[in-house]
Image (tube, grey):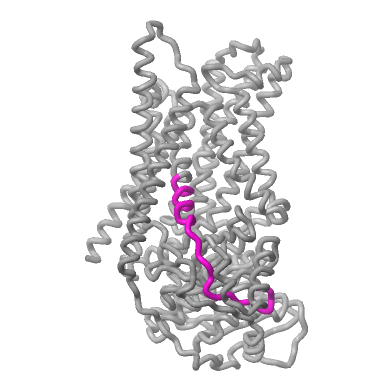
Amino acid sequence: MAMKYRCTLVVLKSSMAMLLAALACIWTVRLTRSWKRSWHEAEDRASTTVFSDSVLAVASLAYVYLHLTSKTDQESRKRRSVLMANLTNPITVMKCSIGIVSTAELLIATLFIIFLAWTYYSNVSSSFKMMTPYKSLKLNKWQLKMMYVGVRIGSLSEACLVLLFLPILRGMAVFRVFGVQFEASVRYHVWIGNLIILLSLLHGIIVMFIWGVKKSLLKEIVKWQSVGRVNIAGAMALTTGLIIWITSLPQIRRKQFQLFYLTHHLYIVFILFFLIHAGDKHFYLVFAGVLLFAVDKLLRIVQSRGTTSPISASILPNRALKLTLLKHPCMGYTPTSIIFVKVPIVSRFQWHPFSITSSSNMDNSELSILIKSHGQWTTGLFNLLNSVIDTGSSDHLKDIQIAVEGPYGPATFEYRRYKSLVLIAGGSGISPFLSILQDIASRNGDMNKNPIKVQLIYVVKKVEDLSMLAVISPLLLENLKMKLFVTQENSPPVTAEKILQDLSLQIKTIASNKASSKGALSMPEGLLWKALITAVSFAVFLASLIILSYVFLHQESKSSSKKKKDPSWIGDLFALCSLTIAASCCAMATMISRWKRTVSEGQQVPHRQSVCHENTSAKVQGTERHEIEFGIRPNLVEMLDEIEFGTEEEEVGIFVCGPASMNESVASFCIANRQCRKKDQRKQKCNFNVHFINFSL
């Protein structure tokens, strides 16, 4: 059986590689003269499928691959993890918003920039040789060249738009096949979005400058020609994009999150005006990403229609909340997974991501998250739950409705391949590591599945922030070593054990009966269903497009004796209607599937045996092994050097979740360590593989 899985995985990987290679070749050679002479007409006839089918086929195969990956043996996953770790290790630290860049990221970014440069050069050189004059404007040679320069810059933003939606797919995240999770790939969306706005702005400024020189700016910008590009739609798309970009700036997003969230939904308007401006043939270039995002969005809406209520809520001394929700027994998730939460009584529209702090191996019927109060939404939720706890009545918990999307996380999380594990967290960055510690605790006793050494370096501002550890203090293992740093307070004469015990006594908790909870969290759709729904959605789109074209255009062409071009808006409308039909059919199929599953589960709910742990070992063993420092920040470079000289294992896993300065310190050390290994491998005992977990979205 294991050999069968391995062969299937090889076939899937080879198929995905060939499809991606073929797509890259088409995008590259379509700009050459020989392609335009021999294949341009064929490209026009097959424009609906030639640029979309490969991407959607790769997505479907990727979901099947991820499904099978979780079933393969640990040794196979370990070999894949070693290769991925070498590609994702940092190679440089940029002192700007880009941050830390890995080998794979730098390579792909370089290739993409080369592709954009090649695209621009080919298009501009071809336009300069043809020099076809504009019918509506009498332009001299330099004005005509300038116009072509501006138009071809717009085609670059079109190429970027192909990738814009892929990094922000959640349930249908295709980047997971490369080991990149949703929370990490969001920054690719930011990079591409910034590039699109820059190119679109240059495109608009240059074109409008030429119109202004000819004193026909207003006339050209409001023109809505029946055939060809619609200028007013392009201006509206640019305006919409600028609004989205401005409200996405960190200074605005952090202070006015609801404004950022609501204006981001203008992407629908942006795509609509792009379709009208560029035409349906150019829309098919970016169609695959739009379809995947539309289906992903609808699947998330279907999952989040149901609500639940917390079965327990705790308030920590540092104004953090611990919420425990009831979940379906078969809902599994890996450590560092996240869920998106909406509390309608606080805000009807806002969704916020939080790391899961529990382990599905520890308890198969509950799921926990930690929420730190530091913004308008989290403060509102804190005040609400604080008032409920003050009343002392658990009945009020049932009145708090919570909608959940997810969980979203890696198909496999290979921390267990390391014999030594170093967890470095700052502030709220401890949340994803709590799930790792819980998972380790659930496997305690089987040391073949656990790291032998686990060290936690945790940096907080105040002592109260250490209460985030109090929720797992009964589960601290003998092979766990903690180094705690409190940066803004002086040292009291107490031990780490005493501080954690005192903080745990200050936690206020209220719990309700599980039977009174308003429903358990339902499982999201499986990977095989997502593979099927991706293929079906594209098939429905093509069928709808063919039927609409036959019914309307074919009949009209029969009755018309003169040959004339159909208005551009007809093709745009057909594409939009077909996309809507395809996405709606997928949503309906998912709703029916979930309804059938709910009925069958109501008749017989499967149960898995939970891993039980006695709380008799609540005291931390070997307290002298745990250190706490006050009034100083950790020197991570020195600490990691000490770990290096005290470790004999070849591979050491470092997981970091904290602010940018913390990530940069760890990345700089790992870069220096790798350079030293290349110079003299005999003196370097271990190799550090660093994994960064997103601190915030």
Left or right of 396? Residue 602 is left
Residue 668, compared with residue 532, is above or below; it is: below
Q: Name the residue located 50 percent from the left edge and 92 percent from the top edge.
A: 617
As drawn, 447 above or below 327 = below
Task: Give percent across and percent down for residue 225.
Answer: 57, 17
In the image: residue 169, left or right of residue 342 = left
Q: Nearer the viewer, residue 54 or 239?
A: 239
Q: Is residue 189 above or below residue 340?
A: above
Could you tell me which quadrant the N terminus lies in? bottom left
Q: Observer-nearest residue: 658 or 241?
A: 241
71 to 311, vertically: above or below: above
Per the rendered image, the range of residues in magenta is 295-320
Please name the residue shown 31% across and 47% down the image: 15
- Res 568 visible: yes
* Residue 64 inside the magenta-drawn segment: no
Q: Is residue 688 visible?
A: no
| Furthest residue in direction top, as rendered | 561
Work out which quarter of the rendered image holds the C terminus and state it: bottom right
Residue 204 sits in quarter: top right
For the point 56% across and 27% down, which residue is it? 277
- Expressed as whole percent of the image width and height from the top left, the position of residue 271 reads 54, 36
Horizontal placement of 404 versus 74: left or right? Answer: right
Residue 298: say if magenta. Answer: yes
Where residue 479 sits: x, y (%)?
A: 49, 86
Question: Observer-nearest residue: 519 or 253?
Answer: 519
